[in-house]
Amino acid sequence: MKKQTKLIRTQTQKSQFREHSTPLYLTSSFCFEDAQMGKELFDNTLEGNIYSRFSNPTVQEFVDKVCMLEEAEEGIATATGMAAVFAGFGALLASGDHIVSSKALFGSAHQIITQILPKWGITYTYIDASEPKEAWEAAIFPNTKMIYLETPSNPGLELVDLEMVGDLCKKHNLIFSVDNCFATPLIQTPGQYGADLVIHSATKFFDGQGRVLGGIIVGKKEYIEHVRFFSRQTGPSMSPFNAWVLSKGLETLGLRMDRHCENALKLAQALENIEGIKSVKYPFLPSHPQYNLAKKQMESGGALVTFELEGGFERVIRFTQKLTIPSLTSNLGDSRTTITNPNTTTHAKVAVADKEALGIFEGTMRVSVGLEDIEDLIEDFTQAILNSK
Ligand SMILES: *Cc1c(COP(=O)(O)O)cnc(C)c1O
């Protein structure tokens, strides 16, 4: 069966009530039939649910779907995307280890790598996404344990060559970990390039409607076992209620991503022709410097479009006052178009020189293109840009 069919048809086993829609097991613990069963569940001679910090059938349904999409062996769902990012580091790195990471990261991942991991003696080297293989390889030391990256990056939409990094990880025996949140597994499958771990903020496209927080880390069994131990003991587990919302959300992921990407490409093309815009970044625009790489490793360009307005922050303020449809919010991956000015919001704490290296200027706007009618969106962006001179 194809992924889409499996995504729709993967479901927790029916209960005695013969429900059609998937049940929600909102329970903190599970009963033992007798003391012998309790003993066997705890000494691992019997597999089964004990307590929802360890496992839960509704959460497992969500995990099974994401493992199927990412072609991964096992997974652990977490309360947020950041809990998944941290669990990946916490479970697999030790004092004295070193990570090589792409520089353009989600803000909190940057804070973990630069502020939290160094407290435990874990060091890092940042590499620009578009650097050649030699630069990535030169950053690998004898104590390097992992390469961690996001592609496309936030908000610059720069790409990292997954095949190139996968080859390096194989050659140097490193754990290859990818945050695949921006692309989603329907557009890009890092496991096909050798990724050992794939991480998602389920808060974004998996939910798709801005309702709940969630995260997940999937990958090779040998690594996920360590994440399972870490999660069971430290407790970043996903709530069954959120898992239920997210599992239902995944049923429409394919339909939604098709429309998100179609709308994003059309908006990016339209923006390129509006006076008052310095540049437009979208992986599937031929003007993107890594267009060929995008075509190779992505099925479509994704839902994010970044552009730079002329005229600095004053112009940005006027532009956002004139826009009528998009929501001004730092979240993304919603059925509703969202827009934010990274320079003053998501990346406000980043040093100016670093911001420029990440492609963030005063006039930079990041759009997560939603599912509204694209003609309405183009009309609204056009009038807001022309009327904010
Ligand atoms: C939002 C996001 C995260 C963090 O996810 P939360 O669910 O907000 O904790 C991590 N990585 C990327 C790329 C994101 O967009």
Image (cartoon, helix red, strand yellow):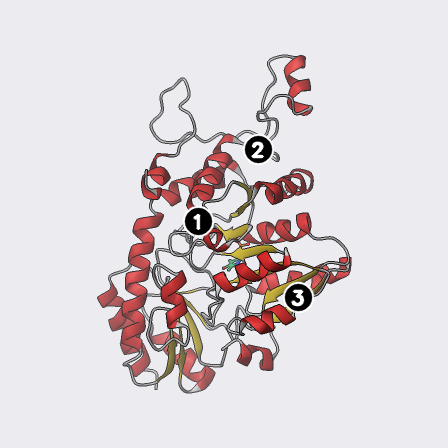
Q: Earlier in the sequence, mark 2 or mark 1?
A: 2
| Amino acid type, residue under disc 2 in the picture | Ser
Q: Residue at x 60, y 27 (%)?
A: 29
Q: Nearer the viewer, residue 157 or 18?
A: 157
Q: Is residue 282 visible?
A: no
In this image, 324 relative to 71: left or right? Answer: left
Assess disc 2: are there few (<14), some (14-19) or many (≥20) residues with their C-alpha within 10 Å of its C-alpha. Answer: many
For the residue carrying disc 3, how many other residues have a C-alpha within 10 Å: few (<14), some (14-19), or many (20+)?
many
Please identify, in this view, whether the residue under mark 2 or under mark 3 is nearer the observer.
Answer: 3
Image position, residue 94 (x, y; %): 74, 53
Question: Please, what secondary structure does the residue beneath circle 2 have?
Answer: loop
Q: Indicate whether 54 appears above or below 368.
A: above
Can residue 144 be seen at all in this image of the molecule? yes
Pair 2/1: label in front: 2
- Dot 1 corresponds to which residue? 211
Mark 3–mark 1 Cα distance, whole angstroms, equals 40 Å
The one nearer the camera, 81 or 331, is: 81
**Residue type highlighted by circle 3:** Ile
Q: CA distance from mark 2 to mark 1?
A: 23 Å
Q: Is residue 375 left or right of residue 37?
A: left
Q: What separation in Å lies between label 2 and label 3 (alpha carbons)?
A: 36 Å
Q: Position of residue 10 (x, y in %)?
A: 39, 34
Residue 140 bears which disc, if any? 3
Q: The C terminus lies in which quarter of the figure? A: bottom left
**Secondary structure category for the residue under label 3:** loop
Residue 55 badge: 2
